[in-house]
Image (cartoon, rainbow, N blue to C red):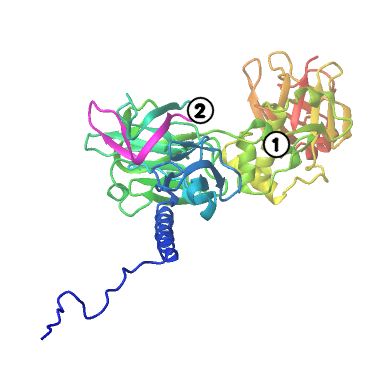
Amino acid sequence: MLIEDRSSTPDYPPQAPRRWPKRLLVGGLVTLVLAAVAAFIVSAFALSGSSIEPEGDTLGKVTTDKFGGEVSSVAATAVKTGKDVPVKLEGDTIVPTGKLHAGEEIKVEAKVKRPSAIGWLAGSTKTVSQTVTMPAAKLEEKWLIVKEGKNPRLTFDRPVAEIAYGAPGEMIHRRFKTPRSGVTLGKQPSAGQTSVRWAPPYQELGKTKTVSWFPATGSAIVAASPTAGSTISATTPLELTFSKPVKKIFGGEDPKLSPEVDGKWATKNRHTLVFTPAGFGAPLAAELKVDLPEKLGIVQSDGSTAESTSIGWDVPAGSELRLQQMLAQLGYLPYKWNGEEVAKTPEAEMAAATTEVPKGHFAPRWGNTPSGIKELWTPGEENVLVKGALMAFEEREGLEVDGIAGPEVWQAVMNSLIEGKVKPEKGAANGYTYVWVDKTEPETVNVWHNGKMILSEAPANTGIPGAETENGTFPVYLRYEETTMSGENPDGSHYNDPGIKWVSYFNGGDALHQFDRASYGSPQSLGCVEMPGEEAEAIWPYTPIGTPVTINPA
């Protein structure tokens, strides 16, 4: 029996080894390469970002990722004006090359050049931008309590790079390489005030502020701005800073000013009150005071303190030139004035009287103005013509007649100008009159009114030796239609003459008046200018209060 040997012969013929097609192998490799490239591109994009981030007081810091590239240029523009702002790159920080202002908005841009590896896909450059508001530095305290032996120290809520302090126009400037939040003012009086300006890095100095400091005495002290005892203008605001809160000093009441001034008190902060004048403000040529409820230490100009129950300032008189301009415009002078117009408001008139005197020129109102008037007239300086004009104005306005431009007179003159209350020209008592007496014998009196001679070389008598009529020019200050004249003769005896008519006093007891004499033209009186009744009566209406009378020597 044949037995089949199956152990060496398989049931099925063996299969040949499996082989991959070449194209499949190539395709797989390409796929792997593309996947790697894609992964690289994704990674590169993920690491190619750039931006501008806030960085302290600068205009920002440019940040770039690994594949973000390098900054090729930076630029900045002022948002409000659209003007270019010069900047530069310091490391990766954008800083201005000039000075900016607190609160100013600046748009900054940076161009970033990408690496060539991704530049062909995403573009060769990228521009990033940011709008920055320049920060302001705030002064923490404007009123300081300074311990004995210490100096006033200013503290800011952010570092400053520059500070200026002291009197306006004489400020001390300090610049710091490393910005600081605290600055000591150095050796100062125990109490005082100073103007201060400061700036964070890359900025111009800001607005001027006032800082006050007081010694740590425990008692209340007040610093005034302007400083107590100084000269101020009529419309200067007054600021009072107390070492203690205002309510502890005045309670709920406002301070009292003397003389009274139109205006308003306001609370600036819990330590400071401000008075803002209205209208004409404080009277000119006055001493202005704030009354205090108790005796306080008042900071003086040298920084020391002096106890008082009031704070005072001097208000100067207005400009003599402006006074003349106004009197001329109102018709009280023999000159007219032509010049810059002033608005008819209290504020404008006060400014013209004190700080901004208008420019212009004077000219005689009449072509035949007497030479005596021209010799007396000096623009911008006190003279008898101005005194007479003031007396005429005072008499017409119901004021005390003294020819002095005090506070009340100044305000009345300005009010009259605003209201257009020009002195009339028609009528003997109006317009302008000038009288002159010649002692050369025969003695005469002359009257000129509004460009016309009312009386020429009328006979007159002046004073005898021992009672001479004083030479010079004097304004009429008192008048009577009829009065009794009495006095002492040169020999010591007395006289009492009733019924003297047409009397105009111009210098003490000297007057223009009627007096009956046998003759006229020579010295016969006791200092007066005597005239016949007819001439005296004719002259009297033309010699109102303020009329200048000149006595010329022989």
Count of numbered badges drawn on the protein: 2
| Looking at the image, residue 442 lies above or below residue 288 | above
Magenta range is: 143-168
373 vs 382, left or right, is right
Provide residue 502's location: percent of width, then percent of height.
76, 36
Residue 358, numbered label:
1
361 vs 236, left or right, is right
Q: Which of 549 and 43 is in front in this view?
A: 43
The N terminus - image quarter: bottom left
Tell me the chief SS of the magenta region.
strand
Residue 156 visible in the current orientation: yes
The kind of secondary structure element at disc 2 is loop
Hey, which residue is sitting farthest front in the picture? Answer: 1
Q: Where does label 2 land, which residue?
A: 169
127 vs 454, left or right, is left
Dot 1: few (<14), some (14–19), or many (≥20) neighbours within 10 Å?
Answer: some
* Residue in the picture at 68% in, 26% down: 381
Provide residue 512's location: percent of width, then percent of height.
75, 30
Provide residue 70's location: percent of width, then percent of height.
47, 42
